[in-house]
Amino acid sequence: MQSAIELYSERGFEQTTAAEIAQRAGVTERTFFRYFADKREVLFNGSAELQRRVVTAIAEAPAEMAPLDVMSRAMQGAATLMQENRAWSRQRTAVIALNPGLQERELLKLARLASAAAVALRERGVPELAASLAAETGVTVFKIGFETWVGDDAHPDFARCIRDSLDQLRGMTSGV
Amino acid sequence: MQSAIELYSERGFEQTTAAEIAQRAGVTERTFFRYFADKREVLFNGSAELQRRVVTAIAEAPAEMAPLDVMSRAMQGAATLMQENRAWSRQRTAVIALNPGLQERELLKLARLASAAAVALRERGVPELAASLAAETGVTVFKIGFETWVGDDAHPDFARCIRDSLDQLRGMTSGV
DNA sequence: ACGCTCATGACAGCAACTGACATCACGGTC
DNA sequence: GACCGTGATGTCAGTTGCTGTCATGAGCGT
């Protein structure tokens, strides 16, 4: 992972071959592909862990809490996890921003996160459509909160960015 | 496009080679790649047109309309466009559902649609954050509306599915 | 008849993966 | 201490997606 992100940052994702990453890490190309399904996956290793935490956070939320509040809470939990590695987040974001293929992968991970969250909500008794909507909305708010957090030094608190984002959305939807 | 979706449906996306698609269409593999950037893109040819229509719909909406209503209107316009080809939508959806790579591409197209919509909203004077949120939310509502429309014969009106989805979301966010 | 342009074909080549087999270090067992 | 199973790694060959380059040829205007 270290070798990969270094090379991606130095010369770009497409200009980096799997063989080069492997070589820098001191292994074979074949070994590289035994650990990562493809070249892109190196940057998305943490997402499984993230998803696990979000799902358990949803499951453990107080029973009477409204779906969207549950989502907000879970997303803020995930945020505090990433809070420490802001530098890594920035480097990773910069690399991804330059390559459509990586953006695709990121979107897929977020979509999977949303659908896992929807399942977790349904298991709390939230009806189908409401669960999907709350999950998708929660992830949207997470995404936009992430952008402001990672892009602007003036917003150092990721969880707060998420809350602000949701508040803004509430303001927009309540009108009419 | 015809040859491609046939083969993808018959034997699956990964089991279909570019050469086979080209052969069935009566051309060379090389010319296939001159028309489509990659194997996946064959299924996403209409998205540029869709995006164009959404953007102009946003631009032409009445000036005093609230951002989220503008999005709802634009998305419903897109919906009536697709309304006629429900069979095609179903076949396409079935193929995509079976392949993560195709899902990635679909998500990318939707993300691009959202960001184009956000730009169009900003040009109406909607502030940055509100524009992004409204755009993302609009696309989310479109996506979920699409799922219920394409998946259930009981909901034949795509535009109505979108309205219902947004109404439901409004109900969720307004509470507290 | 000439030349221009544009679509296509032909061909070579790179790089992302994959499957099959060999090697080899390690830990436990007799 | 020899033996063996297991799991990680290396090696190699092969398929496929995709690209650059040049040749061919059809249509079209002059």
Image (cartoon, coloured by chain):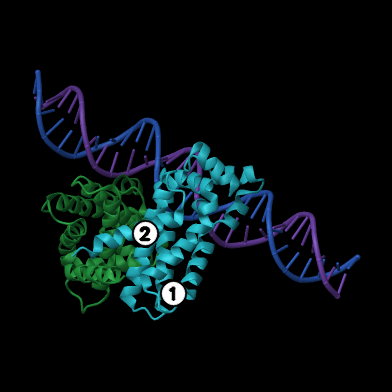
Chain colours: A green, B cyan, C blue, D purple
Q: What's the residue type where badge 1 is placed?
A: Ala
Chain letter for mark 1, please: B
Task: Examine the image and state in which quarter residue B66 appears.
Answer: bottom left
For the residue carrying disc 2, how many other residues have a C-alpha within 10 Å: few (<14), some (14-19), or many (20+)?
A: many
Left or right of A103? Residue A60 is left
Q: What's the residue type where badge 2 is placed?
A: Val
Q: Nearer the viewer, residue A101 or A174?
A: A174
The location of residue B12, given as percent across then percent down, is 48, 40
Task: Examine the image and state in which quarter residue A156 appears.
Answer: bottom left
Residue B120 marker: 1
The location of residue B103, given as percent across then percent down, is 41, 51
Question: In the displayed image of the protein, which residue is found farthest to the front?
Answer: A176
Left or right of B160? Residue A8 is left
The location of residue A47, given as percent across then percent down, is 25, 54
Work out whether mark 2 precedes mark 1 in sequence or the reverse, and give the earlier one: 1
Does any portion of residue B101 appear in the rendered image? Answer: no
Q: Read off the residue under disc 2.
A: B141
The location of residue A124, given as percent across then percent down, is 18, 47
Element on which disc 1 rests: helix
Do the residues bearing badges 2 and 1 touch, measured as CB atoms within 8 Å?
no
Left or right of A5? Residue B150 is right
Marks 2/1: CA–CA distance: 18 Å
Does any portion of residue B146 appear in the rendered image? Answer: yes
